Structures are given as structure tokens and as C-alpha cells.
Image: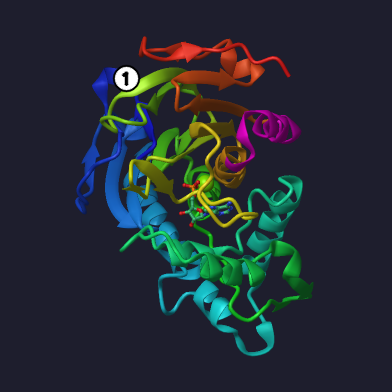
């Protein structure tokens, strides 16, 4: 996972786990401060939920159900999901209000990012096959995948979606953030006091208690951080070129693709972390800002009122104004740079 989270309280650790643990456990700290936590696998990643509050154990169960159900809608790797049906060409192109709502949100982000974020490049991602047998695709295949991609090629008429044959919609850059936004609603409705929920590289910090969030060391141990910041009541997402990648002749090929060229983004960045109240915005913008690079990414983060931290391959750290004053560099190999727009 790209973001490591350290609870300040008595060494409680909600960091990513390398194995899947399907056991829930409950700790009693008085009736109203009961904590429950659970790690489970969904959305192609490990999900870790820790909730404190009167009904924390029930809340953790609800979170697991919510994420599993959401995966059943958004996953394009599940045969029975609604997105798979849409990608395969649902009869009449009719989709649910829920999926329609998500698509409209993503179209807006795609537009505002000038197409740097584009959720219609599933055919292109499949060619690179980062999840299974990654390989550099044939240039002609990349061009063909690009001709069926492009969010502007989608059209809507009520709940009816029309898309080019072969276009594959991919929630890989946003499903985790969408999950966090919906988990927040579950927490509110369950009167939870506080919670830390991590879904892959995206984390929700719920409640007023400050939590120290570390940005992971890109090249080394996922548990080591190079910088940290104390946050509450927010979401944090990181996109990094060290996730889902492979090397050919010493060159790194990774899963964040430039929708214009069809190739992995190669702009000197290795990770972008975005902080915002909205999970879907942090998740989508970490990807978009990675594609846009420092200057374009800074502008997009500002447009959305988000904070962002950019880490470069030559170990420099750039950040938006507010987070610049709060971030602590914890690895002396990295240098904080003042960004002048
Ligand atoms: P993330 O780790 O949130 O940055 O998401 C990366 C995933 O989003 C990749 O594995 C692809 O499934 C998908 N993706 C890659 N490049 C883009 C892009 N430019 N816009 C939208 N989704 C992308
Ligand atoms: Mg993302």
C-alpha cells in the first residue's frame, strides 16, 4: 500500500498487511469506546478497517459488506459486475442510477484534468497487463486501443449510455476512493466516534482525532515513510510508479498511463499524494496529478481545493502551500523544495 498510517494512540497500527487476514476482533474500552477492526480482501487489494464507537463491530461488518457489494458493481474483472455488463455492451445501454452517478463524477474530473485522467482506457491497460503477465505491447495495438478510448466518446441519454465497441470502462483509479466516501456515510449513520479505513493506497481518517500519515519510501520497504503529516477528518490517496510495474533493460514500466500516448507516464515523478475530504477526488486526482506532472498537478489540486505532495525520482519533494507548512521530512535522503508557481 502506498500510504502508511500510524495511529498516535498507544501504538495501534492500521498499516497495510501483506497477507489477507479474515478474522475480526473486538477490543472493549468502555461501552462507548469499543474498537473493532478487520482486514479483508476486495477491490483487488487488502482493506483494513478500524472503528471506535458503541456499535463498532456491527459497523465493521457493514463496511465489509459495502465494499464487497461496490466491488460487485465496479470491478471489470468480475464476470457479473455492472461495469463488466456495460463493457460487454448491455442491451439498450441502460445502467443503474448509481453507476450513472459515478460516471458523471468521473467525466467531470476527466474534463477538468484535460483528459490526463481518463477512466475509459481499460483496453489500453489490458494490453500492458500489469496485473498478470506484464509486457510492452505492440505499437499498433496501442494505437488501436487508443481509438476506442476517450471519455468524450461516451454519450448519455438519461440512464442510457452509448460507447464505442471495445471501449472498456475502468474504475481502477477511483473505485477505492468511491468506497471511502460511502464508508464515511456508514460511519456517520452508525454514530462511530473515529475510524481509520485503508483501501489499497487510499485512506479515510474519520473523526477529530489527529492521525500521523506517512508517505511511503517509494523504492524500499512499504512500511518505511519518507515524510509524514498529522491529519483528521479527511481522505488521502497516493499513486506511485512503484506499484504494478516491471523493468525492461533497466527502464521502469508502470500502470499509470498517459491517455495521449498510451505509454506509462515518464515525467520524473514517482509518487503523488492528494489530501481532500472527498475520497473519489483524492483517488482520481492522485492519478491525474501524476500524469500532469508537478506544474499541471499543482494547478489541478488548486482548482479542486486539495493539498498534494509530489515526490520525484531524484528524491525531491514538492507540495501545495498548506501541507508544505505541516509536512515533516523523515528521510534525510529527500529534500523539500519550495514550489514557485
Ligand atoms: P491509482 O493507483 O489510483 O493511480 O490507479 C491506477 C489505475 O488506474 C491503473 O492500474 C489503471 O487501472 C488506471 N489508470 C491508469 N492510468 C490512468 C489514467 N491516466 N486515468 C485513469 N485511470 C488510469
Ligand atoms: Mg487513484
Q: Nearer the viewer, residue 49 or 191?
A: 49
In the image, which residues are magenta? 291-305
Up/down of 88 relative to 171, above or below: below
Measured from the top left, where is residue 107 in percent x and y?
Answer: 71, 57
Residue 105 part of the magenta-drawn span: no
Measured from the top left, where is residue 185 in percent x and y?
Answer: 55, 48
Please give the residue where the numbered disc 1 appears in the rendered image.
Answer: 9
Q: What is the basis of the colouring in this image?
A: rainbow
Measured from the top left, where is residue 58 in percent x and y?
Answer: 35, 51
Q: Which of 38 and 203 is in front in this view?
A: 203
- Residue 319 visible to an observer of this rendering: yes
Measured from the top left, where is residue 167 in percent x and y?
Answer: 60, 73
Q: How crowded is mark 1: few (under 14 residues within 10 Å), some or many (20 or more)?
A: few
Residue beneath the point at 37% across and 48% down? 245
From the viewer's perspective, is 270 left or right of 93? Answer: left
From the viewer's perspective, is 235 left or right of 106? Answer: left
Quadrant where the C terminus is found in the figure: top right
As drawn, the residue found furthest toward the bottom would be 91
Q: In which quarter of the image is residue 219?
A: top left
Amino acid at each position: 500500500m502506498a500510504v502508511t498510517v500510524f495511529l498516535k494512540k498507544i501504538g495501534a497500527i492500521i498499516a497495510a498487511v501483506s497477507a489477507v487476514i479474515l478474522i475480526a476482533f473486538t477490543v472493549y474500552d468502555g461501552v462507548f469506546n469499543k474498537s473493532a477492526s478487520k482486514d479483508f480482501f476486495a477491490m483487488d487489494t487488502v482493506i483494513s478497517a478500524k472503528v471506535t464507537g458503541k456499535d463498532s463491530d456491527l459497523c465493521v461488518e457493514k463496511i465489509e459488506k459495502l465494499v464487497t457489494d461496490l466491488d460487485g458493481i465496479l470491478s471489470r474483472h468480475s464476470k457479473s459486475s455492472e461495469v463488466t455488463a456495460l463493457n460487454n455492451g448491455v442491451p439498450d445501454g441502460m445502467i443503474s442510477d448509481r453507476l450513472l452517478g459515478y460516471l458523471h463524477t468521473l467525466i467531470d474530473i476527466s474534463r477538468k484534468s484535460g483528459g490526463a485522467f481518463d477512466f475509459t482506457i481499460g483496453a489500453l491497460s489490458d494490453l500492458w497487463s500489469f496485473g498478470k503477465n506484464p509486457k510492452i505491447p505492440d505499437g499498433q495495438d496501442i494505437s488501436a486501443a487508443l481509438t476506442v478510448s476517450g471519455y468524450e466518446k461516451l454519450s448519455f441519454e438519461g440512464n442510457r449510455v452509448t460507447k464505442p465497441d471495445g471501449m472498456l470502462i475502468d474504475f481502477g483509479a477511483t473505485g477505492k476512493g468511491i468506497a471511502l466516501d460511502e464508508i464515511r456515510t456508514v460511519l456517520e449513520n452508525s454514530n462511530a466516534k473515529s475510524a481509520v479505513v485503508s483501501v489499497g493506497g487510499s485512506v479515510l481518517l474519520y473523526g477529530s482525532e489527529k492521525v500521523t500519515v506517512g508517505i511511503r519510501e517509494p523504492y524500499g520497504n512499504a512500511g518505511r515513510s519518507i515524510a509524514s503529516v498529522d491529519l483528521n477528518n479527511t481522505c488521502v490517496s497516493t499513486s506511485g510508479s512503484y506499484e504494478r510495474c516491471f523493468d525492461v533493460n533497466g527502464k521502469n514500466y508502470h500502470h499509470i498511463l498517459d491517455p495521449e500516448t498510451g505509454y506509462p507516464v515518464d515525467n520524473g515523478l514517482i509518487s503523488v499524494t492528494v489530501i481532500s475530504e472527498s475520497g473519489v477526488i483524492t483517488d482520481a486526482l492522485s492519478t491525474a496529478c501524476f500524469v500532469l506532472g508537478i506544474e499541471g498537478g499543482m494547478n489541478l489540486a488548486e482548482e479542486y481545493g486539495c493539498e498534494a505532495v509530489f515526490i520525484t525520482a531524484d528524491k525531491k519533494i514538492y507540495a501545495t502551500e498548506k501541507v508544505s507548512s505541516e509536512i515533516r521530512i523523515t528521510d534525510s535522503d529527500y529534500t523539500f523544495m519550495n514550489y514557485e508557481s
